[in-house]
Amino acid sequence: MKITRRDFLKFSSAAGVGLLLGTFGFDLRPIRAYAEANRPEWISEACSICPYCGCGCGVIVGSKDGTITYVQGDPDNPINRGALCSKGQASIQLSTVDGKVNPQRVLRPRYRAPYSNEWVEISWDQAISEIAQKIKAQRDSDLIETENGVTVNRLETVAALGTAKDTNEECYLYIKLMRALGIVYVEHCARV
Amino acid sequence: MIMDNELEIKLERIETLCKQKPSHKEVLGFLKKVITAQAKVKADIKMEDVNIDQQIVKMKAKEGFPLLDKQALKFDVGLAKGLFKKMSQILRNRVPEDIEQINQALKTKELNIESLLKNALRENGNYINNVAQKLRVKPAVISFLVKNTLKPFFEVYAESTKDYVDQQHWLRNYCPICGSKPFMAELHGKERKKILVCSVCGYKWRFIRTRCPFCGMHIPQGFKYFYTEKEGKAWRVEVCDNCKKYMKTFDTVEAGEQLIPDIDDIGTLYLDMIAENEGYKREIGSVLF
């Protein structure tokens, strides 16, 4: 390993703590026994963004064995600097309530047919296809192609609402799609 | 005296840890001798008023240079020699053959404490290994002596220059004062900000929570740590699957108390053993190794 000036007094850590302490003749058996009596409990942490209001506060989500165990503000996020409002603090309940998976959480798209009062679970493919068909039908019927002899290709009967949860790249793709469709009413949840 | 108070607090902490974890008693007892010897010397160190040009401070911070170039550390040679000999005495019962070799080399002037310390500051680990080979002693013994002799001088320097550091903007993985790597982390406040502790001068500075302090890898989707149910969540060991290193982290809010890094590091050696069993390595040693 290349030694740099930041490695000051870094020596044989590769040898392991036990081996190095053994060099000085310490009896490590009691410490080893203590370590064996203490089993590690593993936690995973992931950075995410609070899904509620338009602020887009940074959160750290802790999980154990795939179940979310806590949500806390990200101290390094420049928006909230570790703080969270009461809704953000309770956002763990979106996934887990009293240690169990929230039974009311919506995991798949749902469809309510016209004049029906029931929601039916559908696949993502079906949901995307349904939305695409509706946008196409609306655009085909309402697109304003010219105004005062000028080509405008404007669709005024559809509006788009963005989200604070998207990244810059996602926002770029989103606005590109909206402009391609001719949608001019593009808003963001932070302003409504 | 402030230094006496500091020592009293440290000794009290050692006593508490010995009661809490009798398994660590032997190592903590040894640490007690080391810390007491260092505190006595630290009380006698007279640091001249440090006056660094603000422009230089800003430039160094911007470019990522620490305030102190290690080889420029000024230390009282007389005090350092005394402490080196004291550390040798402390080690005598543990590695008698190596200490005998070192004492012999000092007598025959094959080894000079001043030049050993200065060269160690200038040439880092390689020099220590070469000296150990030449004297036919274990490198860990020379490392222990050098590190623990210089530590109080670094600590005093850090205390006298800490006000120069821009805590908000220094988010690097090495100390803003002496440029050394951290050996431990703390989580502070309700927000659980991560604070790193320097392995050499003991200075504490802010760092990014989900970034590995060794390889610098940002792990937004897979940061892992473990704690032990028996000991509670006050201590966690954060690991990096990229470089396979780990760092012990103390949650001050969960524990409800402040830690003394050098002492608590030794008081939690069992965590090092668990981490090694799980396949991770320690990057930076403690006071003792």
Image (cartoon, coloured by chain):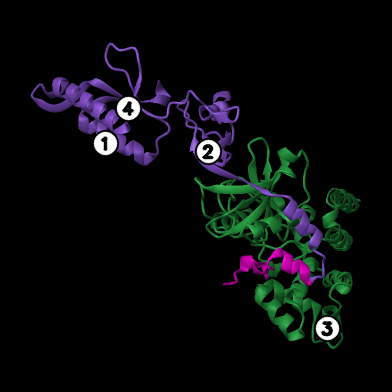
Chain colours: A purple, B green
Identity of the residue furthest to the bottom in this view? B108
Task: Name the residue nearer the viewer: A37 or B213.
Answer: A37
Q: Quadrant of residue A75?
A: top right
| Discs 1 and 4 carry the same chain letter | yes
- Residue bearing the label numbered 1: A176
User: x, y (%) of residue B272?
Assistant: 70, 57
> Of the residues shown, which amino acid type is indicated by label 1?
Lys
Query: Which chain is mark 1 on?
Result: A
| Discs 1 and 2 carry the same chain letter | yes
- Residue bearing the label numbered 3: B101
Task: Name the residue nearer the viewer: A140 or A64.
Answer: A64
- Residue bearing the label numbered 2: A78
**Circles 1, 3 touching at the beta carbon (< 8 Å):** no
User: x, y (%) of residue A14?
Assistant: 64, 68
Q: Nearer the viewer, mark 1 or mark 4?
A: 4
Q: Is residue B21 left or right of residue B166?
A: right
* Quadrant showing the N terminus of chain A: bottom right
Say the numbered circle drawn on residue B221. Answer: none
Distance between the Cα atoms at labels 4 and 2?
38 Å
Q: At numbered mark 4, what does the secondary structure look like: helix, strand or loop?
A: loop
Q: Is residue B252 above or below residue A180?
A: below
- Residue bearing the label numbered 4: A122
> Of the residues shown, which amino acid type is indicated by label 2?
Pro
**Circles 4, 2 touching at the beta carbon (< 8 Å):** no
